[in-house]
Amino acid sequence: MLIICFFLFFSPSFIKRSIQKKDKYNKVIMYIYIGFLTIILGLVFGLINTLNLVTVLDKINTMIKIPNGLLQWINDNANLIILVVMIFAILAILLFCLVKEVGKIKYKKIKAVIMLIGFISYFISAVLFISAAGIKVSYSIKDKTQYEVLTIDKKNMVILSTVNDKFLITEYTLKDGTIFFMTNNYMIIDNNNIFISYLNFSSSPTIVSE
């Protein structure tokens, strides 16, 4: 997936160079084609980076608790944030592809503004992509905080796995803000006629096996 994403980002530049190597080509048609391709790929890359942003925010929230007011603002302005991330992705791809054309602009101030916008777009897109990729690559089961839970005989139970269409469960407790999975005893139950809820713990659980 990382290779595919890198290919998406750099492909307009590669295609442009390939077209320019031909003896005869129409510049107008080439730029229209590159522009259309850049917008489509920018939207795709922007959607990927939107998911990357969620991954980064989740990671930050587990390390440094994000204030509820900021989380509410992000939730209320989700559409605007998605749009901004997509625009950054489109501009990053477009300006990387047209860096030579931008370099030929005679007016230094205009060139500087365009280069600054391109740098900001490229930097934000790259940081989101690389940081989220690093988080996902380094992710382990110990970092998991989202589980399906249920109650049996007034005991809080968590689903650890599925075995032959049955649930492997164990008891969990909450003490002083820490979640403990009591893995010294397991149960395997049928998955019929039980009420299951989805719970996101505030931190990864501590395993108690004795």
Image: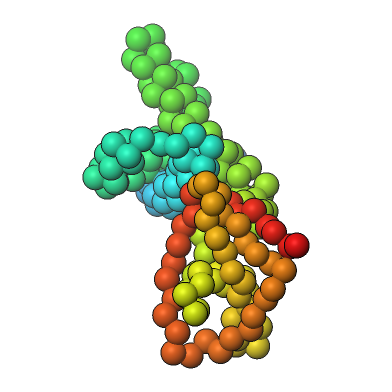
Q: Where is residue 7 in the image (x, y as percent from the top left)?
A: 59, 48
Give 157 or 53, whichever is nearer the viewer: 157
Can you say whether 173 is above or below 83 in the image?
below
Can you say whether 74 is above or below 106 in the image?
below
Q: Is residue 158 left or right of residue 195?
A: right
Colour option used: rainbow
**Residue beneath the point at 51% across and 69% down:** 156
Give 145 or 90, whichever is nearer the viewer: 145
Can you say whether 207 is above or below 157 in the image?
above
Q: Position of residue 31 (x, y in %)?
A: 40, 40
Q: In this view, does 204 lie to the left or right of 103?
A: right
Quarter-of-image position of residue 169: bottom right
In the current view of this chain or complex, which residue is farthest to the top? Answer: 108
Give 103 or 197, whichever is nearer the viewer: 197
Q: How many labels does the image show?
A: 0
**Residue beneath the point at 35% across and 10% down:** 109
Give 207 or 19, whichever is nearer the viewer: 207
**Residue beneath the point at 46% across and 32% down:** 124
Q: Is residue 185 left or right of residue 36?
A: right
Quick one: quadrant of the N terminus?
bottom right
Q: Position of residue 95 (x, y in %)?
A: 44, 31
